[in-house]
Amino acid sequence: MIRRLLLCALFLAVPAVASEPAVRSFVAGSLAQITAARQGKPFVLAFWSVGCTHCPAELKTLGELKRRHPRLDIVLVAADTPDDAPQTAQLAKSYGLGKVEQWVFADPMPDRLRFEIDRRWYGELPRTHFYDRTHRIDAVSGVVPEARLQQWIRENL
Amino acid sequence: MNRQWQERLNAAVGTAVSVAADEQGTLWLARMEKGHVWISRSDDGGKRFAHEVKVNPAPEAILADGQNRPKVVAGGGVVAVTWAQALPKLHTGHIRFARSVDGGRTFSTPITVNDNLEEIGHSFGTLALDDKGRMALVWLDGRERAAAVRQGGSYRGSSVQYVLSEDRGATFSPNRKLADHSCECCRIGLAFTPEGEAVAQWRHVFGDNIRDFAMAPLRADSSLVRASHDDWQIAACPHHGGDLAIDESGRRHLVWFTGSAKGAGIYYRFADGAQLGAPLALGNPDAQAGNPTVFARGGQVVLAWREFDGRQYRVLAQQSADRGITWSSAREVAVAAKSADLPLFVAGARTPLLAWYADGEVRLFELGVAR
């Protein structure tokens, strides 16, 4: 009996280990968590949304860059709702970003999250925050031209 | 289907409303609930809205959030409303219209105004009515883009289409194109000149994705004037339109938002013909100052906008008694803690009466200076 339970537990555990990282809930304080985990390291924080017309172009470019530069640290934050998590995960995967850290907005007043992230961000998507080693931020609204992404990689990776 | 679009299609209650005044001072509120546009009236300046009437008899998916809202106008015994009916495909819709000629008791069967009926974008419609019964309806339209794509080409943004009426919406002109290459998802500013010509102001795509504002009169040989020079280059939809008012002298008063690195925030300027005044920065850009609206009449110009300080929404206002030359400092009009639509001046009101749908109720504020 015990062995059977263990076997069950093993079976349950296997898919969890093998699956893609879960989409985490982005709430007040999440940004501090994301930056704290990357002290002294450059990364790209990319905000997007399932319904945003211009986001696929951005995700596609980021996916290709990630393939060419595996060390590139990308954090995706979907300005959607936790209910959208399965779809954001699936979309991210389709752009080759299935393995990067993923978050989804989880606040009944998303304006509050935006204000905490950058009080000068009015919600345009995609929105990309480039963090250098010292975590100085360069924020770009709209699809980032690929040349600019390439330049950032040259200067920071 | 896109889940979020599905949710917008199934939204129980709209988060964006509009209010109009007729010449008697009766206020008319248009809102969306459970697939219907509802019109109610207030005879006490907006303290209480009553006698609510269902406009479209059959429920349909209606966009009533952010830059899309049922837009009501009233005057000469007519109450008229336009709205965007959402179609199943993502970001597609039809421009709908209905009117009442019996004091808002019953409404005509809704019509679809766009004569192109493809399942593409026809939305962000707005409506204006002048004292002589002229009506203008202008919207953002995907037909030019769809045609270009069908031929294997590409197309920047959307086009601006319109219809005009000389009889308060009993009949309309055919659909006409005002301009190619508008930005796709920003509300449009619309007002009549004293001569009875409607003028629209919208976010345009200039060249390679410079999304600044343009304006143009709604007439056949129209050409647009660039109305802001912020050089905001952005490959995205800012979902943040502007507003336009025209005073008795024909001076056009414009407010808008830009995210340009040259100076992000909201601005006011006036225009006399092609002559543009200097832009005046408004509000606190560190408190998300945005979504400005403008009133201009009798020498008075009043501006209002929304801010958010991380906890609360606020409406602020600023006024000029000399047609936009000198300005009072900004003052706070109202606060809301949970939810807030854009503030909008009441269409057709003789005084600067501001409507704000916030924390679940429609509030009205008379912003006129006592004289």
Image (spheres, rainbow, N blue to C red):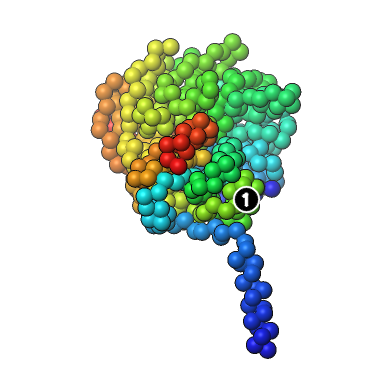
Left or right: where does residue B219 sit relative to residue A107? right
Report the quarter where the C terminus of chain A lies.
top left
Query: Where does residue B34 sit, x and y in percent of width and height?
Result: 62, 51
Q: Residue at x 35, y 17 (%)?
A: B277
Q: Residue at x 69, y 48 (%)?
A: B1
Q: Amino acid at mark 1?
A: Lys
Q: Is residue B275 visible?
A: yes
Query: Where does residue B26 sit, x and y in percent of width and height?
Result: 47, 37
Q: Is residue B338 visible?
A: no
Q: Quadrant of residue B249?
A: top left
Query: Where does residue A5 sit, x and y in percent of width and height?
Result: 65, 83
Q: Residue at x 65, y 47 (%)?
A: A94
Q: Secondary structure at mark 1?
A: helix
Q: Quadrant of residue A69?
A: top right
Does B119 appear above or below B8? above
Q: Quadrant of residue B284?
A: top left
Left or right: where does residue A15 sit relative to residue B191? right
- The residue carrying mark 1 is A93
Query: Where does residue B39 sit, x and y in percent of width and height?
Result: 56, 43
Report the quarter where the N terminus of chain A lies.
bottom right
Q: Residue at x 30, y 32 (%)?
A: B318
